[in-house]
Amino acid sequence: MQNLKLTELIENLSSAEFKRLGDFIRSPFFNKNINTVLLYDLFEKSISNQTFKTLSREDIHNELYRGKKYIDSKIRSLLSDFKKLAEKFLMITESEKNPGQLKNILLNGLYERCMTKNFDSISNEVSKDLKQEFNKNSYYYFNRLSYEHSVLEHKGTNIEVNLDSRYFSLSDSIDYFFFATKLELINSLLSRKYHVLGSLKINIKFIEEILSFIKENITEIKKENPIIYSEYLILMMMTSEGDDQYFHELQIFVLKNIRKYNILELEQVYYPLINYGFNKVAMGKNEYLNNIFDIYKTIERTGFYAEKKNFQDIDFISVIIIGLRLKKTSWVEMFYFNYKEKLKEEFKDDTTNLAKAMISYSKKDYNTAISLLNIVNYNNSYYYLKSKETLIQIYYEQKQYETLQSLIDATKHYIKRRQNVLSIHYERYLKFLKFVNMLLKAKLKDKSEAGILKKEVKTSNNAIAREWLLEKINELN
């Protein structure tokens, strides 16, 4: 297809969505042009026989207007009309994900047409839904604002009705909408800088006032506004240097209420908890391995991963790493087979090969692990370093010491070129390479060096593969 915007629209619809698009285009309420229906049928046929990407405007003309003179502007206009219909379809599809917003739109329509009985009926439905909702995020408060504003307009026509409580309620909704939106914004910023735990100073207006209000009303906030409470804990967790209290409070609160969070809000707490835990592990606090695994295991039981359309490749590999470090091999294999198909195509092969290689290594199937690692493309530094770390351990186990030495040198050069990118992991990997060199020296030249090495590794809690290094040192003795 030469129309790149339309091509992108069509190619990124699921098969179910594309079928619904056909129903939408065939509906006379939305479309009365038979040629757009014929164009949809042509697209459906070309997708089926895998010729959609090569479909040209001339092909469309020859199929829809056989025997007639080709007019480019006519085909362009038809494609433009089809694109507008596809966009309208997406707008409606996306709006269906927010039924609260749709009901507010309905309330406005009923109010404008003076349909009082229907307005009151729908208003009661919306009020009930709002009271029962656990996931009171910025979208919730936006819908609540719209609802309360509609009710005020409707009830306000009667000047004898006392509406003071409704005005106060609307004022509270405005405040909480501001709190929720501001906290979500700040935590989104922090999620991009999670490697600087506790050291990031936020210069954003009104944040101190928001935090002060939440602290003064913490019991009520926790009970009535659990999402704002979660976002507050995330912010405090990420900005409180050396204080793990907020991580543990958040973990307990989330796991206790995990069935109440919707997918969107579960993601909002999932990634900060996991990132925080991984950074603590990187700093040498290995007790966080169990915290992270408990989160993964509990989240998996809720169906969170099963409901996700796509699995982030780094997140997938991280689950594998944590599970294998805790020797939960059976669980890791279950996880791998259940969710590997959810990886995006562009990262799927490399992610599955790296995951299978690590699982094979954990089972001491070194040859399989090597063959898989050799076909992993290094999409990022994380994949490169995890692959090399695993290969270094395998070559040592296989006594391929010359190959191992070359690999150590190449990895060291790679790390030094990426110091800024690696952040806190830069020193960790340099330590690992230094310790492996010392291990080789102790094994091949002077076993008395093992004592010095053991002392250094024991005091380096944040070194990569620390448990493996200690195991190999003990074998020397």
Image (spheres, rainbow, N blue to C red):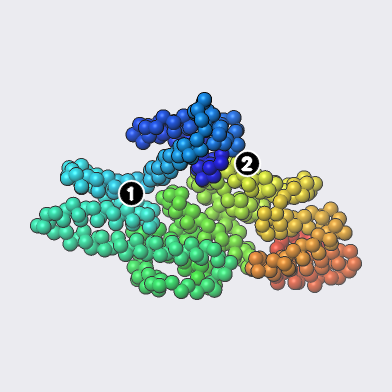
Q: How many marks?
A: 2
- Quarter of the image where the N terminus is located: top right
Q: Residue at x 41, y 50 (%)?
A: 260
Image coords of residue 100 (percent x, y): 33, 48
Residue type marked 2: Phe
- Say which of 21 and 428 sits in front: 21
Real-space CA distance between mark 1 and mark 2, rounded to the nearest whole angstrom? 38 Å
* SS at badge 1: helix
Please give the residue where the numbered disc 2 appears in the rendered image.
Answer: 337
Give the SS element for disc 2. Answer: helix
In this orientation, does residue 359 appear?
no
Vertical placement of residue 409 versus 71, above or below: below
Give the residue at mark 1: 101
Q: Please name whichever residue, 164 or 213, is drawn nearer the observer in this view of the structure.
A: 164
Q: Residue at x 33, y 62 (%)?
A: 176
Q: Position of residue 476 (x, y in %)?
A: 83, 62
Q: Is residue 246 left or right of residue 448?
A: left
- Type of the residue with mark 1: Gln
Q: Is residue 340 left or right of residue 121?
A: right
- Give the class, few, some or many, for how many residues have Cα within 10 Å of label 2's Cα (few <14, many ≥20): few
Q: Is residue 467 left or right of residue 3?
A: right
Q: What is the quadrant of the C terminus in the image? A: bottom right
- Kindly identify the residue that appears in the image at 48 percent across and 57 percent down: 269
Numbered disc in front, either 1 or 2: 1
- The spot of residue 143 in percent (x, y) is 32, 53
Does 430 appear above or below 386? below
